[in-house]
Image (cartoon, rainbow, N blue to C red):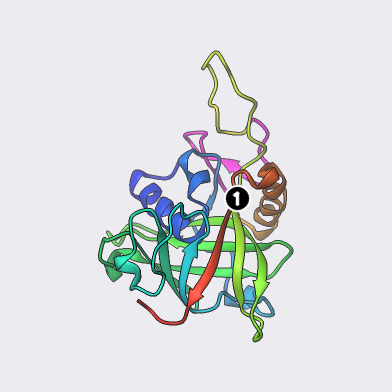
Amino acid sequence: MLASGDWGSAMRIATVLGAAGLLAGCNSVVSTTPLFSVKDAQGQPQLRSGVWLDENAPCDFDRGKPVSEWPGCATGWVVRPGVVMAFAGTDPPNPGQTRYRFVLAKGDPVTVQVTLDDGGGAPPTYAYMGLRPLKLDAQGRVIEYKMWMALCGPPPPPDPTGEHDATTTRQPIDGLLMDASKHDCVASAQGPVRESVRRSEAWSRDDKGRDRALWVRDGER
């Protein structure tokens, strides 16, 4: 299982990239070294730079205001090439804690690799998600997408007795090794990650466990 600091970072980056709900539990694919690079992103439409919004925001508000002034019911973030800057509600952005590097690796679906670095000197962890562009602009940049977490294997059935973990798979995908805690799994090659991304989309059927986000406007505020 990710360390508590890594989980805090993972929760935040997943929120701003649109998949926070799935990080509430475990069963997530991680790696200790980066498995994808900018070379894997060649030919893949990238996210349009600017202000983005979680489409699940349950409120109406002035989207023209700086993201730091958005109400707590809305989650916004700023995208730069290969970097996302996260901040929510009225909390001011802190670049030292809220910038995350990511790679959109070409594929069907897209594999997203996010670097989780707590800045405390510990080696970074890499988390994985799947993404499907829903809309492109005239220049071929992604302006709307849905996203889901890459899971170690199919979620287990509910256990009314409480004797077994309700989130961790009992059938990990080949090539994914469960960590010492048996809550998450570690990948060492692209293939198992891509397989997880592909199969995890179906495990989030009917859009449950998927999140959607859309580009709002240019700018970094």
Q: Position of residue 139 (x, y in %)?
A: 64, 86
Three-letter code for the amino acid on which mark 1 is drawn: Arg
Residue drawn 59% across the image and 45% down it: 209
Task: Tell me the SS state at disc 1.
Answer: loop
Q: Quadrant of residue 101?
A: bottom left
Name the side, left or right, on which 95 lies relative to 34.
left
Q: In the displayed structure, would residue 143 be above or below residue 109?
A: below
Residue at the outermost top position: 161
- Which region shows up in magenta? 170-186
- What number of labels is visible? 1
Name the side, left or right, on which 92 lies relative to 51.
left
Q: Position of residue 36 (x, y in %)?
A: 59, 67
Q: In the displayed structure, would residue 58 be above or below residue 104?
A: above
Residue drawn 30% across the image and 70% down it: 95
Q: Position of residue 150 (x, y in %)?
A: 60, 50
- Near-viewer residue (41 or 81): 81
Please say whether residue 176 is one of the residues in the magenta stretch.
yes
The answer to whether any part of residue 13 appears in the image is yes
- Near-viewer residue (142 or 111): 142
Residue drawn 40% across the image and 47% down it: 7
Residue drawn 50% across the image and 39% down it: 26
The answer to whether any part of residue 174 appears in the image is no
Q: Which residue is mark 1?
A: 210
